[in-house]
Image (tube, rainbow, N blue to C red):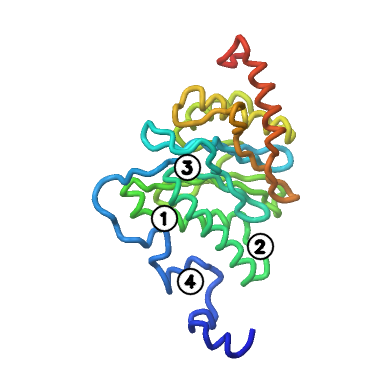
Amino acid sequence: MTGRAESQLPASFRSAGSSSFTEFLGAHAPHLLPGGRPAVGEGAVPAPHGTTIIALTFTDGVVVAGDRRATMGSFIANRDMQKVFTADEYSAVGIAGTAGVAIEIVKLFQVELEHYEKIEGTLLSLEGKANRLAAMIRGNLGGAMQGLSVLPLFAGYDLGREEGRIFSYDVTGGCYEEQRHHSIGSGSLFARGSLKKLWHPGMDEESTVSVAVEALYDAADDDSATGGPDAARQIFPTCAVVTAAGVRFVADDILEQQVAALVERRRGNPGGAR
């Protein structure tokens, strides 16, 4: 960078700051933060909401999966919404709640983790990432009071402990580590019941993805806000696998095979009772 280009940058960009991009933004442009906008009036703001997200651990890491539907009241606002994202190389986050605000917070979270890595020259610990996300949720409390709540489900591979871990949140920013499996969103009650029956220790990746697809299928069976697999439109759940090798998403053709096998198993036994 030339001396002339440096002189054109605001002073805030040329002074040493903390490793938190959110703190930098809060100090110099707080109106750009999701929770920094003024209230738009009383009462809930109508907006699309994302629904069911699940996470479950397996031998080599953790799987995060979500359905694709967004609703606004009884209206299906979007059939193929992406609700599971890569947070960084070793973690993923799924969103439930007000879709627009949730996606904004996820993008800011991605920048936050990248900024930390560039400033500190190392990855933030998995617990550190979970706590950074908690602070962002806490910063959106004003929006949550207007009905613009965001409830992510965060999971990643802990390089120190060599295992997958799951963290959930409440609207005040409370962060809670979950054991083995967890679900959030309107269909979570039904997904959790399914996970309790199907999850078991020592599962490999293929069986874990199968359980994730089946739990979302059960959620969609009883919750109208959760979208089931749509073979006609080729819309299948989003499924991220996080291991020591990093984050990758399961291809749609594999998910289609999982869904076809599930439907065949449920033929004549739609509830899936065993």
Q: Nearer the viewer, mark 1 or mark 3?
A: 3
Query: Badge 1 is on which residue?
Result: 138
Distance, label 3 to label 2, CA atoms, is: 26 Å
Distance, label 1 to label 4, CA atoms, is: 17 Å
Instruction: Indicate which disc residue 96 carries.
Output: 3
Image coordinates for residue 158, horizontal then vertical, percent: 67, 51
Which amino acid, by three-letter code, is at mark 4? Phe
User: In terms of depth relative to the viewer, which is nearer, 211 or 45?
Assistant: 45
Q: Earlier in the sequence, mark 3 or mark 4?
A: 4
Image coordinates for residue 95, horizontal then vertical, percent: 51, 45
Q: Residues within 10 Å of mark 4 (few under 14, many from 20)?
A: some
What residue appears at the point 71 percent right and 27 percent down from the top-left corner? 257
Which amino acid, by three-letter code, is at mark 3? Ala
Distance, label 1 to label 2, CA atoms, is: 23 Å
Query: Badge 2 is on which residue?
Result: 123
Specify the quadrant of the image occupied by residue 215. top right
Q: Is residue 238 left or right of residue 52?
A: right
Distance, label 3 to label 4, CA atoms, is: 27 Å
Helix, strand or loop under label 4: helix
Instruction: Indicate which disc residue 24 carries.
Output: 4
